[in-house]
Image: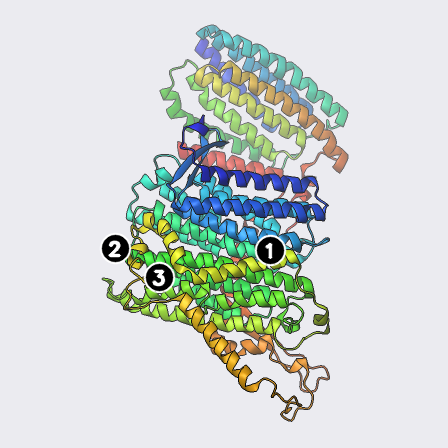
Amino acid sequence: MYLFDAAITPPLDLILGVVLFWLLIGMAGVARSRSLRFVSRVLFPMGAAGSLVLAAAALYAIGAPTAVRVLPLGLPDLPFHLRLDALSAFFIVLVGVVSLGVSLFSAGYFRRGEGATPGLLCLQYHVFLSSMVMVMLADDAYLFMVAWETMALSSYFLVTTSHRIAEIRRAGFLYLLIAHIGAIALLLCFGVMHGAGGDYSFDALRASELPVFWASTAFLLALFGFGAKAGLLPLHAWLPEAHPAAPSPVSALMSGVMLKTAVYGFLRVTFDLLPTQIWWWGVATLIMGLLTALFGVMFAAVQSDMKRLLAYSSIENIGVIFAGAGLAIIFHAYNNPHLAALALVATLYHCLNHAFFKSLLFLGTGSVLHATHERSLGKLGGLIRNMPWVAGLSLVGALAIAGLPPLNGFVSEWLLLQAFLFSPGLPNPYLNMLVPLGSAALVLAAALSGYVMVKFYGVIFLGQYREEKMRTARDAGAWERVALAWFAAGCIGLGLFPMAIILLLDHVTLPLVNFTLSAAISGNHWLLFAPVAAERASYGPLLFLLGITGTLLVTFLTVRAFYHGRIKRGAVWDCGFPEQTSRMQDTAEGFGQPITQIFEPFFKVRRRMPDPFSSHPVYEKSNEDKLWFWLYLPIARANERISSWIGILQHGRIHLYLLYSFVTLLALLLFVH
Amino acid sequence: MSAQLINLMASLMLLIAFAMLAQRRIRSLIYLFAWQGAVLAVNSVIVAWYTGHGELYLSAFFTVLLKVIALPLVLHYLIRKLDIQWDVETLINIPTTMLAGIVLVVFAFNLALPISQLAGTITRGTLGIAIAVVLLAFLMMITRRKAVPQVIGFLAMENGLFFAATSATYGMPMVVELGILLDVMVGILILGIFFFQVREAFDSLDLKHMEKLKESGE
């Protein structure tokens, strides 16, 4: 009966069909759980085909009118409400395009004997994908929380794929713990928004008249809850633990898509469900975002495990995204729809970009890991010779994440900076002082992320082999190459055609902030793109590309014309060092040393100097997170202490337990009396 | 006349409750329990006769069947089988327990005073006694060291609840009453099996052996 009373629209049907298809694939995987060949050569490519359909349907739905649907599932009086509007469609596109690449990569990635059986992995993987889509589609708090928790649990099992290793179990536990703390905050948030009346459908939440105090409470709970999933500052601790523990496709999916579900939820609650926006909400989000960005990039610079490095880099990017969201809230609260739309577009654009380049890099580390069985940067090096495909495609990702034009990372960061720099004119003088400071912090983070990427790419792929076994490393297989190429093409395409993306994003921002950038950019020349006004700032990615390729070509031809055939090969001057070994090249730790020196107060640095008389001198240094010692450990200890106090109650003597009931009964009787 | 009879029954209930609290032998404890059931049944009949509630006859019948005949037989069988007809060991000595019992009775009467004033039933004066019987049975459960007296305490508590229901509202609905009786029967069955298992595991029915079952945290 529920099935037929809502308008039936093809995109929503297609998306639901893909979700069902994925679940069936997962079941099929369990049915033939031990057959690696069947799972990886048949099921994962089928899943990728599903992703393609999903992405296409959602892309179509961005411009289409909102579709709603009630599913006859769930509890008797609580059916699942679904709704596909532009915002959810955009994020479903993101799920589709990333999972397309990751599924293709997984088809060639998983090996035998790595923890869970292939079929189980296949089930968890596809349940994870489906639950993320359901999070985006949910139109009531009940389905949202069910999908949200399914997502957390399925990703937990994916993280702990190699569950025989104690480290990985520990990382998984930390992840699950923080995910649940966040989920509790979200439950409370929905409870606060619900107030007293109505049901838990988002329509009812939108309609509820919240006093300012309770709206702010709901907002702060949402910031905390979604921040825990995204990795905002005090709750970031799970990211650098869980990402190295998870298999690389899972890391790619978690970093590329799952963190974005938190962004989606945050935008949904802040811009859609809550009736108003208050300026200090934006300030809080902006400050948290900037702190997170700086923190993440600083820690990324000093890591010596390649996946931890990328995890910290994800923290940085999430910080940038939340900073953009905060800026959008500020502008929206001050009734400046143009800049709010600009900041929001930059935020969403960065979500998409980060999904592409971070997935690319995580998958690239997966290929390196399989080729060398080594995660530590101190042992890699020189892989560009053995793995030209992975090295070349990862280079695109590294350049994009560093924010170099004409790739995609530049566009979103540039847009965000535009939003920052046009902000003077806010009716609040303190904010006018704060926001330029914020833009400076953003620029610092962007610059440092360039530094981080030089380190990441240089240490892994360039230079000499640091270990002998690097010589035997082999390049990735065809499936993996296709997946990497897909993401690299995405990085380039998103960078070259910003206008098309922004026209698409307009459908998303219009209902949220009542403004479209297309009006502002419609007068632009088709090559130049100016989001605010042509005389202030504009950017032509194609011109830029032409410039770069032209310069390169001219230089190449000139050099060739002058020097070709005249090169004399001889021994290099060895600077007085007749022997050059790979141990002499710059290491990851050495490269990060300046950052450690400059930002030393932010790290907890432990150094162990070698004994001057030791025949085998060892130098050890570790950079640890101060928040871990200041925040997490005290809370854990306090928790243990309270538990042991409560444990005193548990004597094991039945008489005492009876006495507890008796005293409680008497007390209650007395109270009622 | 009826009111006086009911009051007589109520005081008998209280007397038996105190006797159970003071009793050291398990065998006598079971006799006392059976007597308490009998008094309860008589009380139900009197109330039924006076008020014309036909259901209460049925309830009295079941009380006799279960609490005067069946359960005492089962308990006698149990203590014979388990060979535990020895003295009851108490955690607190008897006089102290009795003093605590008196305090509880005062508390119960104090508690029942406002409710009795509101109630319009003929039995309203006995509500305080009913609560006192419940609390005394609970006290017995707390102060006994062995498992069987605790079970008898539990059953006596159920008697008290029954009595309270009769005195406050002329008995619970029949469905509830039957449900409770069934619960008690099943409970006895499980506890009977449980006794054998406990003795098997610990060679004794002393509950202090079960203290080591808790999570070791010391």
Q: Is residue A556 left or right of residue B78?
A: left
Q: Position of residue A143 (x, y in %)?
A: 47, 39
Q: Residues within 10 Å of mark 1 (few under 14, many from 20)?
A: many
Mark 3 lies on a secondary structure that is loop
Q: Secondary structure at mark 2?
A: loop
Residue at point 64%, 79% (across, down):
A619
Left or right of B204 in this view: A518: left
In the picture, measured across the screen, residue A181 lies left or right of residue A173, that is left
What amino acid does circle 1 point to?
Pro
Residue B20, visible in the rendered structure:
no
Q: State the image coordinates of residue A395 (x, y, percent, origin top left).
A: 55, 68
Q: Chain of mark 1?
A: A
Q: CA distance from mark 3 to mark 1?
A: 38 Å
Of the 4 image quadrants, the one containing the N terminus of chain A is top left
- Give the answer, above or below, for where B28 lies relative to A513: above
- Badge number at residue A568: none
Q: Depth-wise, is mark 2 or mark 1 nearer the camera?
A: 1
Task: Judge by depth and name the residue closer to the eye, A140 or A541.
Answer: A541
Q: How many angstroms separate mark 2 from mark 1 (CA)?
A: 42 Å
Residue denoted by label 1: A249
- Mark nearer the viewer, 3 or 1: 3
Kind of residue sitting beneath label 2: Asn
Q: Residue A455: which quarter of the image?
A: bottom right
Q: Left of A55 or right of it: where is B142?
A: right
Q: Residue A335 bears which disc, if any?
A: 2
